Amino acid sequence: MIARPLLPALMASLLLSAPAMAGRRPAPGFDATLPSAPTAAPTEGAIFIAAAGYAPLVSGARAQRVGDVLTIILNENTSTAKTSTAKTQRSGSANITPPTLGPLSMTSTPLNASSSGSFNGQGNATQTNSFSGMISVTIAEVRPNGTALVRGEKRMLLAQGKEWIQFSGIVRLADVDAANQIQSGQVADARIEYAGNGTVAQSAREGWLSKFFSYISPF
């Protein structure tokens, strides 16, 4: 049971956190990355200038520089299942015959004692998640080993609130196809967040007073 002095502090913390939960905002740090500033053209040399928008024949216009845009094909499917079963059983008995002669004689009826206990528990948990869609991101950093850090977000203003998708991760530039697309399963250290706020999202959340009584309830 929660001590009485803790009750006002707990209710105050729930009241202060209620507006923050109702007004959830997208996490910062997913803004589009601008391309690097172009380098100055050489003053002398041949006609070929690599910095003047040259695209190799092999790679074409494939995204490979900071600020380039590529599309992430979101195709996430996860399914987990867990089953746990436990069963124990224990029993014991004792038979004592008291003496019938002498000062310690009690009764001729033997004393019998027995005990038994059993436990049977079972638990099942199953969870399935599916998420599909598309989001365009920009290359934020190109690394020497041929990988790149990408990040981006998509915000949608709907009639009953706002929704947003934020994505970041590390891709291999060799996995990007000719259409500048890559599957989300090929992204390392992927961070995907799909959330929103507004009337619909607020209706799906438990109220602060209900959370308070759920917290202090011993049942």
Image (cartoon, rainbow, N blue to C red):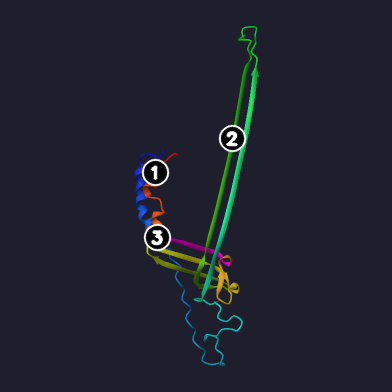
Q: Which mark is residue 161?
A: none
Most common SS among magenta residues: strand
Amino acid type, callout 3: Asn
Stretch of the chain drawn in magenta: 186-198
Q: Quadrant of the N terminus?
A: top left
Residue 150 drawn at (x, y percent): 52, 70
Q: Which residue is mark 1?
A: 213
Task: Choose between 28 and 109: the one closer to the eye.
Answer: 109
Amino acid type, callout 2: Phe
Identity of the residue drawn at 53% across and 93% down: 44
Circle nearer the N terminus (2, 1): 2
Q: Is residue 194 magenta?
A: yes
Q: Which mark is residue 119?
A: 2
Q: Is residue 169 left or right of residue 88?
A: left
Residue 4 drawn at (x, y percent): 36, 39
| Label 1 packing within 10 angstroms: few (<14), some (14-19), many (20+) | few
Q: Is residue 63 magenta?
A: no
Secondary structure of residue under mark 3: strand
Identity of the residue drawn at 39% across and 66% down: 157
